[in-house]
Amino acid sequence: MAMNHDVYVAANDCLLNGGNSLVQMYTDTALLLNACAVSAIEYEKRKDDFHLSTTKNIPKHLRLPVEPEIIFHRDDLAPVYKDQVLQRIAEDFVIRMISLIDATFEDIYEAILPILVPGISEIEITKKIRSAWQQDTNGHVKLLNFLIDDASLVSPVGRQSTLQMVFDRYYEIREIRHALVHTSGELSQKHLTRLKQLSERLPENLRNGSLASASFLQTGRILLSANDIIQLRYWAYTTIFDYFREAFNESKNTPQ
């Protein structure tokens, strides 16, 4: 049977909200990128003996017991805004982007559970959402298996990528987020092994679409640029939000 129409409506609303939130998130990030560019240009123009203290304007009652004063001289500031600060903005964007996508899928799960499981309690819904990202026996998370097995979600016709393949790409970016949060961007052997395994689940002729081969991973440490932010934004919107909107749209009209 085709997907329940109410499931489609609920999921589509969540995906639309997620896509809109991604656009707003990038808008805020774009302003930070602009601030970095303007700061770098202005500090390069200056010829005086200017220096910047990161702690000078902290009120005394909010200072640390041992307060190190970090000072940047004029010649140091432009490179810092072009490299160190930019990298931190890019890392923050990736972390927040994955949190947003996680939340969008969890919102879908929460919205469609009562439709497909009438009478389910709020406590049970909460339990299922908490375990949504646990690996199931088939190598995919419980959430994806629920969407396919219970919500009747099918892969869009005419697409090379299946639902499982798209989620594998999402598992890859979640590994990248994990490295940013837990190992300061250093890819551990565990990260590298997992990325390799996910890449090899793709047909050989499609492996260039794996994030495991992204240029910002090649040194063993995640090194992101402003261009990577733009590419990941495009990837999230098209590969995740657009793809799943298409999948839900087709599934409501597809006999199972």
Image: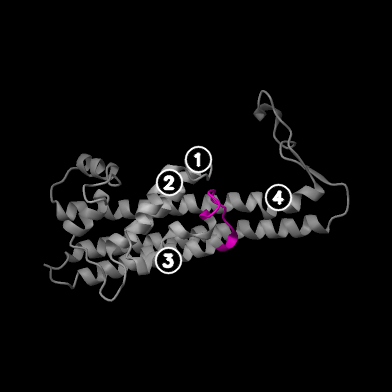
Q: Residues within 10 Å of mark 4 (few under 14, many from 20)?
A: some
Mark toward the start of the polypeptide (1 vs 4): 4
In space, the residues marked 1 and 3 are separated at their CA atoms by 26 Å
**Residue that numbered label 1 is attached to:** 183
Image quadrant where one finds the C terminus: bottom left
The residue most toward the bottom is: 158
Furthest residue toward left: 1
Assess whether mark 4 and mark 1 are in contact (beta carbons under 8 angstroms).
Answer: no
Residue type at tag 1: Thr
User: Which amino acid type is shown beneath numbered disc 4?
Assistant: Val
Secondary-structure class at tag 1: loop
Q: CA distance from mark 1 to mark 4?
A: 22 Å
Labelled pair 2, 1 in contact (Cβ < 8 Å): yes
For disc 4, the marked residue is 80
**Secondary structure beneath label 4:** helix
In the image, 204 versus 124, the foreground residue is 204
Can residue 66 be seen here? The reply is yes
Mark 3: secondary structure: helix
Q: Tell which of 135 and 121 is nearer to you.
A: 135
Q: Residues within 10 Å of mark 2 (few under 14, many from 20)?
A: some
- Residue bearing the label numbered 2: 191
Viewer-side label of 2, 1: 2
Asked if residue 99 is positioned above or below residue 66 in the image, the reply reads below
- Residue at horizontal 23 percent and vertical 47 percent from the top: 136
| Residue designated by label 3 | 208
- Tell whether 84 sits left or right of 234: right
